Image: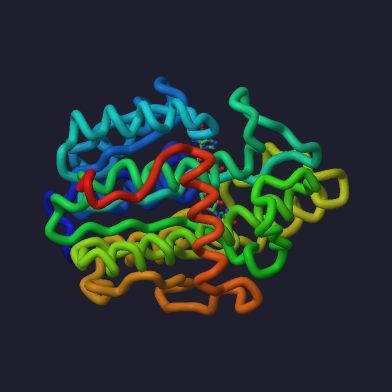
């Protein structure tokens, strides 16, 4: 594995599935990991498991409920004080919600909260740590669902017309668009040390959507389809590649599947849409891109 030793890597949603499989692989390569979970006991348990399995003792934990912007912001502040330098940020935590719309206690629809707002807050909040790395990388775990299920309404990002698959497809589309926007903003401001890319891990047999009630038909079809899915280790392959390979040096603003660049849904992939989503997020969260913080 290339470029690993002593790199400080933060990975969200590392308590299971693709995130945990990637964390184990990265720890084997000698990285200093910061694993994120939402439950402290579960996260500590995974921390011990990673140390036991890999022999790498450089595994720290942070916890936050990433449904909540306040929790996410508190985690950003904690990371900034504990780890002045972060080399790689992997926004992996994600979920498809239930058939009925659910809002967080902050009033945000949960799919958008976890799959879009939390990665945005982590990216913008941790830029001061990433810029201190000689080669900072941000990797956002999106999904090919952005091609199949997205029906975005760029006039109303947190729209009320909800279905779980549409909300998930939209959130993952918006995540790709803001990855591209941040990549462009960094370039425009002369920052060439940080790259920002997104990826699809394939259909992977994890806990993903197994806890979600999508209605009986989709619940049933999901159970059957899972038998043909990739293992979490296979699902983590492109993620680990993007974090570690020297092939990716200087490559930014791209979307990857199976270690190769792939096309983003051409219907929605343009700079105007990137700006709409980015600006909405800045206004909605009160967190913004600024060179003054760097
Ligand atoms: N599996 C697939 O087929 C597939 C396909 C395309 C894209 N993806 C994407 O891949 C990423 C990883 O998913 P996975 O398949 O590994 O799913 P998973 O097994 O369900 O893992 C999801 C991770 O996110 C964490 N998480 C969920 N809600 C959270 C919250 N409110 N706050 C903080 N953490 C939270 C989970 O924590 P707990 O352990 O506490 O539940 C877990 O660590 C997601 O972004 C997903 O959208 C998956």
Which scheme is used to colour this image of the protein? rainbow
Residue 190 on image: x %, y %: 20, 67
Residue 209 on image: x %, y %: 66, 45
Residue 77 visible (yes or no): yes
Vertical order, 82 against 16 (above or below): above
The one nearer the camera, 270 or 214, is 270
Q: Is residue 240 left or right of residue 37?
A: left
The one nearer the camera, 32 or 293, is 293
Residue ID at (50%, 53%): 279
Residue 231 visible (yes or no): no
The one nearer the camera, 136 or 289, is 289
Q: Is residue 254 left or right of residue 246?
A: right
Residue ID at (48%, 38%): 285
Q: Which image quarter holds the N terminus?
A: bottom left
Residue 165 on image: x %, y %: 73, 53
Residue ID at (46%, 46%): 282
Vertical order, 130 against 274 (above or below): above
Residue 35 on image: x %, y %: 33, 38
Vertical order, 112 against 72 (above or below): below
Residue ID at (81%, 51%): 218
Quadrant in the rendering for residue 259: bottom left
Q: Is residue 83 left or right of residue 92?
A: left
Q: Tally the marks.
A: 0
Q: Is residue 239 left or right of residue 213?
A: left
């Amino acid at each position: 594995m290339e470029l690993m030793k002593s790199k400080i890597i933060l990975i969200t949603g590392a308590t299971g599935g693709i995130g945990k499989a990637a964390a184990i692989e990265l720890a084997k390569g000698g990285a200093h990991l910061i694993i994120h979970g939402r439950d402290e006991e579960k996260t500590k348990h995974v921390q011990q498991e990673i140390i036991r399995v890999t022999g790498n003792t450089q595994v720290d934990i942070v916890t936050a409920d990433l449904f909540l912007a306040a929790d996410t912001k508190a985690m950003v502040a904690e990371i900034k004080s504990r780890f002045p330098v972060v080399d790689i940020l992997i926004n992996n935590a994600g979920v498809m919600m239930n058939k009925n719309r659910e809002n967080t206690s902050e009033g945000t629809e949960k799919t958008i909260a976890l799959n879009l707002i939390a990665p945005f807050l982590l990216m913008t909040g941790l830029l001061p740590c990433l810029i201190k790395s000689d080669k900072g990388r941000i990797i956002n775990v999106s999904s090919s669902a952005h091609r199949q299920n997205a029906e975005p309404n760029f006039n109303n990002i947190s729209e009320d017309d909800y279905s779980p698959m549409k909300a998930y497809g939209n959130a993952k589309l918006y995540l790709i668009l803001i990855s591209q926007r941040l990549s462009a903003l960094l370039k425009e401001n002369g920052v060439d040390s940080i790259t920002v890319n997104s990826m699809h891990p394939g259909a992977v047999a994890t806990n993903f959507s197994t806890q979600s009630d999508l209605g009986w038909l989709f619940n049933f079809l999901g159970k059957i389809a899972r038998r043909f899915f990739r293992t979490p280790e296979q699902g983590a392959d492109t993620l680990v590649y993007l974090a570690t390979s020297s092939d990716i040096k200087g490559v930014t603003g791209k979307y990857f599947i199976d270690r190769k660049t792939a096309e983003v849904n051409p219907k929605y992939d343009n700079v105007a849409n990137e700006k709409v989503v980015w600006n909405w997020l800045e206004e909605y969260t009160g967190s913004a891109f600024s060179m003054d913080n760097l």
